[in-house]
Amino acid sequence: MKVLVIGPGGREHAIVRSLLADPNVSEVHAAPGNAGIGKLVPTHNIDGNDPDAVAALATKLTVDLVVVGPEAPLAAGVSDAVRAAGIPVFGPSKAAAQLEASKAFAKQVMAEAGVPTAMARVASTAEEAADALDTFGAPYVVKDDGLAAGKGVVVTNNRDEALAHAQTCFDAGGSVVIEEFLDGPEVSVFVLCDGRNTVALSPAQDFKRIFDNDEGPNTGGMGAYTPLEWAPEGLVQEVIDRVAQPTVNEMAHRGTPFVGVLFVGLALTSRGTRVIEFNVRFGDPETQAVLARLKTPLGSLLLAAAKGELDKAEELRWSKDTAVAVVVASENYPDTPRTGDRIRGLKKVDELEGVHVIHAGTKLDEEGKVVSAGGRVLAVVALGTDLVEARERAYDGVELVQLEGGQFRTDIGRKAARGEIKVANTTGSATGSLPVTKTKA
Ligand code: AMP
Ligand code: GLY
């Protein structure tokens, strides 16, 4: 089978790498890709957010499957255009992508489907915002309603700061969702969906803040590891039963079936499991770690999802190893990142046992040298027999990367490796305390 992967980042590099390991995949193309992807497969310089351009390229290449990586092309309707051209696509329609593109929409669907999530209110004026903030109290959680690459959320004890963020969103013509604060560790679960059926991948943990100990502003994600030894038994089943399947059923019921990855961002709170957010695509950098452990051929799996045949797909097989991904970001990320700097040492990283480099914001300069081209530049991904070994290997790799001004967190997976993550509610089944208003038959 021939596959076209849409997107420029680390997630797409990881997807391409896994597709190439699938014996059923004969050819992979990418658009637009990055320097790392370009080393593996032909890349095509089109606007990946342009539905017609993507459909035309997929048709020209006569691919059997298109995999859409990021949220922007999904929200722009790229999947719809490819599907209309008669080509199977892994990625939701524009209508179904609203689960990520609008937090207010996601909240409505969760309410309809009886999915446990934070209590929330939508606000479009300063008065409404102030009222909602005072309803829930501190810590305050204010979310830009639209797409913001993980950077539209402010969590703060400072009421003025919370109000100021809301005002910034209003000034830009948007609205905000204000929520109750959820305590407890966060987990990312990727659920493959074919419109009807759901298959969950192994849970991962992401590190959203730029600095160690979860300090500084939110980013797209600075590192990840998987699996989660500390997660309650039954968590994945709970996510399927209480979150993913009801959501997929609700989307089908609405006439906008969900095909692709439902990325369930959870908080394991003292009152039970709660959804923090939905995304409609694989997480970045969690995917770099999760796919490093997946043994099931990826292309066949994604094609089955695209064709509505996940019920016929083989059961997932996983490596026993633990995977860690540590992101190297450019100077000044997540603010305006510095770009155009040479990146050295990558070959040496790839030579380390169990370690590989996944490119994100990289490109080749005129001399064909790899330079930085974005905020998150690359991830060093390592497999080890346990989290301690995987971390050691990943950080040995990071030490070899030379990038002026480059920044990385030193504590990816550290708490878990030290056994310091505590889940207050370890029932594994969210009973008793759900703010569920309605369940569908
Ligand atoms: P989101 O874009 O909704 O994933 O939010 C980004 C990050 O903000 C999450 O990963 C959490 O760390 C934090 N966050 C979002 N919503 C809440 C909440 N209700 N309570 C606590 N933290 C939150
Ligand atoms: N790492 C979180 C995300 O992809 O949104």
Image (tube, rainbow, N blue to C red):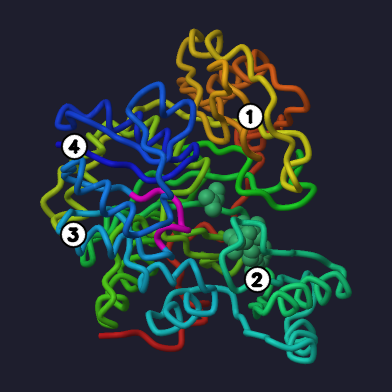
Q: Earlier in the sequence, mark 4 or mark 1?
A: 4
The residue labelled by disc 2 is 144
Q: Contact, CB < 8 Å: mark 3 with mark 2?
A: no
Q: Between marks 3 and 2, how big is the CA–CA gap?
A: 34 Å
Binning the other alpha carbons within 10 Å of mark 3 as few (below 14), some (14 to 19) or many (20 upward) gives some
- Magenta stretch: give its range: 68-74
Relative depth, front residue between 413 and 80: 80
At x 30%, y 70%, the residue is 248
Which residue is painted at 48% across and 77% down in the image? Answer: 432
Between disc 3 and disc 4, the foreground one is 3
> Label 4's element?
strand
Mark 3 highlights which residue? 85
Q: CA distance from mark 4 to mark 1?
A: 30 Å
For residue 166, above or below residue 337: below
Q: Quadrant of the C terminus?
A: bottom left
Q: Quadrant of ligand 1?
A: bottom right
Q: Secondary structure at mark 1?
A: strand
- Give the residue drawn at x 52%, y 36%: 225
Is residue 71 on the magenta stretch? Answer: yes
Disc 3 or 2, which lies upstream in sequence? 3
Residue under label 1, please give it. 372
Residue 19 visible at all: yes
